Amino acid sequence: MRFTRKPGVLVTGSGGVGAAIAASLAGAGVAHLSLFDIRAAGPDARTGTLSGGNLQKALLARALAFDPLVVVAAQPTRGLDVAARDFVHGQFLELRGRGRSVLLISEDLEEFFAVTDRIVVMYEGRLVGDVAVDDTTIAEIGLLMTGGRQAA
């Protein structure tokens, strides 16, 4: 797997799910296996042998190993157990606390309220809402998602 590192940018090359876990974590391998509780036969195990939840944790560990300025996370906790989900949320909150940004794409409204400051909603290809989490409710976001109303 090839990595290109520029300030705040992570571009991964070929390697994908067939790469060895430690190699895909680019130098943070064994430490991240433990920190992220990635359960595998060992650091040389192929990522293609991991369960879905462990693969998601490995992908997150790989992205965070580069201390990015921005993380784009699409459905980051889908299929994870409660403990793993809470760990991922904790990593996002820690990033936020260090002045980093997380662009979260999810269908789980509770996840937005757990880890975000703002929620931006699109409906039929248009932005229909941009609201602070503290100023809205799950019901209001649901209305925005279904075209029921536009944010003020």
Image: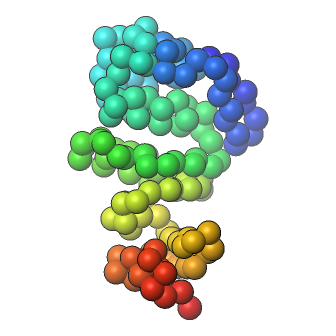
Q: Is residue 24 left or right of residue 53?
A: right
Residue 82 x %, y %: 23, 47
- The extreme right residue here reads 6
Residue 104 x %, y %: 51, 56
- The extreme front residue here reads 124
Q: How is the image coloured?
A: rainbow
Indicate the quadrant containing the N terminus: top left, top right, bottom left or bottom right. top right
Question: Could you tell me how many numbered marks the image carries?
Answer: 0
The residue under the point 70% across, 39% down is: 9
- The extreme bottom residue here reads 152
> Is residue 88 positioned above or below 60 on the image?
below
> Is residue 129 positioned above or below 30 on the image?
below
Q: Is residue 112 left or right of residue 97?
A: left
Residue 111 x %, y %: 37, 60
The residue under the point 30% across, 22% down is: 39
Q: Is residue 85 left or right of residue 43?
A: left
Viewer-proximal residue among 66 and 142: 142
Can residue 3 be seen in the rendering of this structure?
A: yes
Q: Is residue 134 left or right of residue 130?
A: left
Can residue 34 be seen in the rendering of this structure?
A: no
The residue under the point 56% across, 91% down is: 152
Viewer-proximal residue among 83 and 128: 128
Residue 92 x %, y %: 46, 51
- The extreme top residue here reads 44
The residue under the point 41% across, 35% down is: 56
